[in-house]
Amino acid sequence: MTKQELYEKARSLPLLPGVYIIRDKNDEIIYIGKAKRLKIRVSQYFKEGNEHLPKVQKMVDNAYSFDVIVTNSEFEALTLECSQIKQHSPKYNILLKDDKGYNFIKISKEEYPRITAEFQVLDDSRYLGPYMSSFAVREMVSTAQQIFKLPTCNRSFPRDFGKERPCLNYHIKKCMGVCTGKISKETYNEIIDNAVRFLKQDTDKIIDILKQSMEQAAENLDFEKAALIRDQINAIQKLSSGQNVVNESLQSHDFIAVAGSGKNCCVSVLRFRRGRLMDKKEHVFFGEENADDVRDEFLVQFYSTETPPKHVLLDEMPVDEDIVEYINKKSKTKVNVAKVFKGENLKIIKMAYTNAVERLARESGRLDKSRKFLDELANILGLKEAPHTIESYDISNWGDGTSVAGMVVFEDGKPKKSGYRKFKIRTVTGTDDYASMAETLSRRVAEYEKGAQGQFGIKPDVIFLDGGKGQLSSVLRVVKGTAFEDVPIFGMVKDSKHRTRAMVSPEGEIAIAMHKGIFKFITEIQDEVHRFSIEYQRRTQKTKSYAVTLTKIPGIGDKKAENLMKAFKTVANVKAAEMGRLAEVPGISYRDARNIYYYFHDEGEEQ
């Protein structure tokens, strides 16, 4: 359906709440949304002249049809929307990745045990867990190691006693110095037991035990041990005051803040349970620039799989008031969903926001580097905007005049191996790179225009050809008047040393050697597409050379030989095959199978 037809259909919808499901031309669901009034909401997408955010505009451009489900209430629409998104995972909805996994704390089984964070049970050592949060496990282990001054080095005890000088951690009092040999096995294992009690969150009990141990050590005149225990007690008490990550008033709280930067957003969730910061979750959404929309969609999806705590505290309340009701419906008890304005809770919200900003900066920094680089490429080549998807093609010839082509894909400046494709040239006789490149691009465009899936269903932002003016001219002729007519196409030409020298456009050559980053990137693409096409040509040539042996058998021509090689991979496998198995190959008759079998077993040939 055209955009105007979609608009007319939307104008006929009722002014009732419901869910709308938008599909592309392949009948795949690409977006699911809810509306208080379906007619108004859906028609806004397709009304001529309406401006949308870039992501929404892409969705609208790919929309081909839509369905609606009318509901009895706005809340029912919200619930149905969440259910449908979970079921179909549409391309243009915000989707949360399930990063859950089991995590354990390991107490190794050895004379001087170590405490480490692990992702799985690996041996018969002692394990605490499972825990759902890797963050919580790492923090717990790190804290225990610091408080009890446990060794974190790779030395083996007692084997390495006195072999080397103590490391820096010992000198700055972050390690008890087991490597010196002055800590007995009994004392060390007692410390490990106390650390395990601490990890089980029995803080009050462990302090009482440590105080008794300290007094006993002092009575025994073991002042070094007493001082060590004293430091452990001080560390635990210090941990319990003057910070935000341990707070007895926070028994069942989630703190959620959203940070936005340009076209990207990050949601940070700090989860407090039983008075401690037990988990931290961060979700980054690229191409999302409306923090309010991100917050609303995140809350619905997050609490569709997570049990809400008693308190959900936010930097801003959701725009959609039904979300508060939805969160309460997902819990067995009343949930306090509120915006934080002041006090200690505001400090924690700010901490969540800071985490979101920092994560977004890290992620965006990597993207910004690539984006800046691609922006520079767009500027040099005269493109309207930085290319997201780049396709590159190369032709590789055999000695007998037949050819193959390779297509590689770079997405956001990096190779996308899943998008690579191979072509056998079908219509070109002899060695003709121009005609071979034209056939390759003609078939590529045809796949896109007939609605192919996968990479062939994606329209690239720019195309690079391995070659000069000849290849470029032949390709421009075949794409004229097609869906690829507006795709910028350039040739990549090499110098006498086979290094990329320049890019060729319809207007002439574009020098790139003085742009070091761009020069390196274009060279990488040209080398990669050349490698891929050569590799394919060699594999095919090897198969073809094997097939030549098979064509010596009476009744076996090129096509039958090719089918045999596809089925058995090698001539040796063909030779070892039973007659019945040979006859199962497409195009191979029982007579052919007998001829093949007898040819390799020296029992004569059927006449």
Image: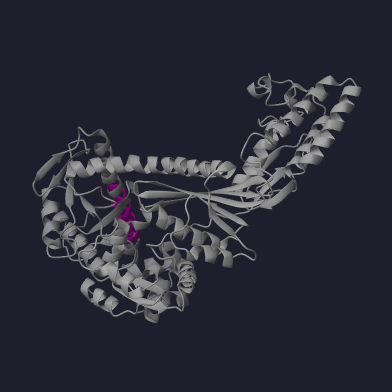
Query: As drawn, is 584 to the left or to the right of 522?
Result: right
What residue appears at the point 52 percent right and 46 percent down from the top-left corner? 341
Query: As drawn, is 407 to the left or to the right of 299?
Result: left
Identify the image quadrant of the N terminus.
bottom left
Q: Position of residue 487 (x, y in %)?
A: 19, 56
Q: Position of residue 63 (x, y in %)?
A: 29, 69
- Image height of 313 relative to 179, above or below: below
- Image height of 157 relative to 361, above or below: above
Q: Main secondary structure of the magenta part?
A: helix
Q: Where is residue 412 in the image (x, y as percent from the top left)?
A: 32, 48
Q: Does the magenta stretch include residue 590?
A: no
Q: Quadrant of residue 564?
A: bottom left
Q: Does the magenta stretch include residue 543?
A: yes
- Image height of 127 relative to 293, above or below: above
Camera-nearest residue between 604 and 510:
510
Residue 581 seen = yes
- Image height of 80 relative to 265, above or below: below
Q: Position of residue 159 (x, y in %)?
A: 75, 28
- Residue placed furthest toward the right: 219
Asked which colour scheme the image uses, the reply is one colour
Camera-nearest residue between 140 and 290:
290
Camera-nearest residue between 179 and 265:
265
Identify the image quadrant of the C terminus.
bottom left
Camera-nearest residue between 58 and 48:
48
- Residue placed furthest toward the front: 342
Range of magenta residues: 530-545
